[in-house]
Image (cartoon, rainbow, N blue to C red):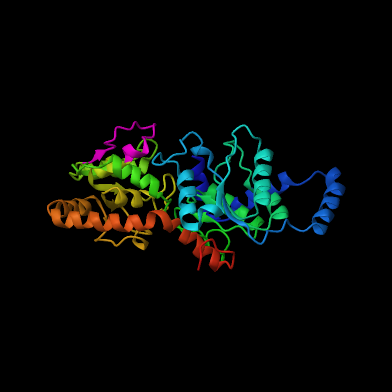
Amino acid sequence: MRQHLSNAVNSRFPRLSWDIWGASRTIRQARPPEALPALANARQRWAKAPVAPISAEPRLLLVVPMADHAEIPWLPAEGNYSFELFETAKACLGAERVDTLRIHPHQTTAEYHRTIIDRLINGQFTHVLCRIDIESNGGPHWSWDEFVRLLRREWSGVFLPLTYDSAYPYVSMHLDRVTRLHHRAMPIVLDRPISRVIRPHRPAAGPLFLPLSDASTHAIDQALEGVEPDLDLTFIGNVTGYPYRAQLLEQLENAGLNITVNPQGRSHDAMPGFTSYAHALRRSKVTLNFTRCNGVPVTQLKTRMLEGSLFGAVVASDNALYARDYFVEGEEFISYRDPQDLKEQLTSLLADDERLSAMRERAHAKADVLRVRNFWEATDRALRQRSMPPILAA
């Protein structure tokens, strides 16, 4: 209900809730009157003391793992995207130039902020990547604007705030505030273009895919050796709590399509192992990709588009927006207007083994190119557009 009310208000007054929220954050974080003399003295000290300089031979990137990955093993093929970001960063940027930092869940907000900043200064890093739609210690209270206030005073590098679902207004609000507070913050957004949603004329990276390392890809390929596609059409993902997905699946089934939902045997609430997820995709001749954000009528780029293609399925997407920036429609994936359109396309495709096989091979080859470098190349392009220090060699 709150989300729908927020959408209604935002449609009429696009930035009202953002401005109110930002003002309330500023007021709440303001020092009390009795602290003003101390604040003035602190400002004098900051003015006299320069930001910690970066050495002539700095480290390049610090990757701060995400709190929601803390319980996932730090190993290949486990679905730990913090691990995948770190491993692909080493492959693209150089292993000696990249490092990671674990945040203990029992650290307070102030402690984990200090831990990151001290590591950046002592390690002489030029860039730091953190996912900002959750707290690094798993805490319930969003504090990344407090972090960047400290960061900009003490460190002169580039802050790379990563978000997954910027379609949700509160996530975009957070990203907008961080970007306004820190002029050297360059957002990375998975799901949609964000540059005109937050600060105009400041390019951001995205939409793009979460990466997958060589080690994980090799481990999964070994585990799936000999698995053949035996399911015509699948959907792999959560349905409970996703009204749009449930409604569309019902419409497709009413049109006469036989859809196997979650052949890997996942429950509605429990996530399957990553290899089981890949195994279900390998068994799929065609798999569905639903692009709409749950609860918000916004089309998103889904990493499922990459993973489905990589693990052997032809992806059938309900919208080709953003997907066609990476894959060739009709040759590497298909999109459809309505259930009847999908039924006609699927009937034709499944009756032509040669075409189906060619599409799977082309999609796999494209995904194999994108899985390591897409994330970092898109980030590097945005950095160069912003005249910020790049992360990849020219």
Foreground residue among 326 and 251? 326
Is any part of residue 146 visible from this angle? no
In the rendered structure, the answer to whether residue 279 lies left or right of residue 375 reads: left
> Start and end of the magenta stretch?
259-277
Foreground residue among 110 and 7? 110
Q: Main secondary structure of the magenta part?
A: loop
Give the image location of residue 3, x and y in percent. Answer: 50, 43
Give the image location of residue 18, x and y in percent. Answer: 60, 52
Give the image location of residue 29, x and y in percent. Answer: 72, 45
Q: Which residue is found at the position 82% from the left and 49% from the top? A: 39
The image quarter in which residue 102 lies: top right
Question: Farthest residue in the left direction?
Answer: 351
The image quarter in which residue 252 lies: top left
Magenta span contains residue 273: yes
In the rendered structure, the answer to whether residue 48 lies left or right of residue 72 reads: right
Q: Is residue 288 above or below residue 57?
A: above
Give the image location of residue 280, x and y in percent. Answer: 28, 40
In the rendered structure, the answer to whether residue 192 lies left or right of residue 353 reads: right
Foreground residue among 363 and 236? 363
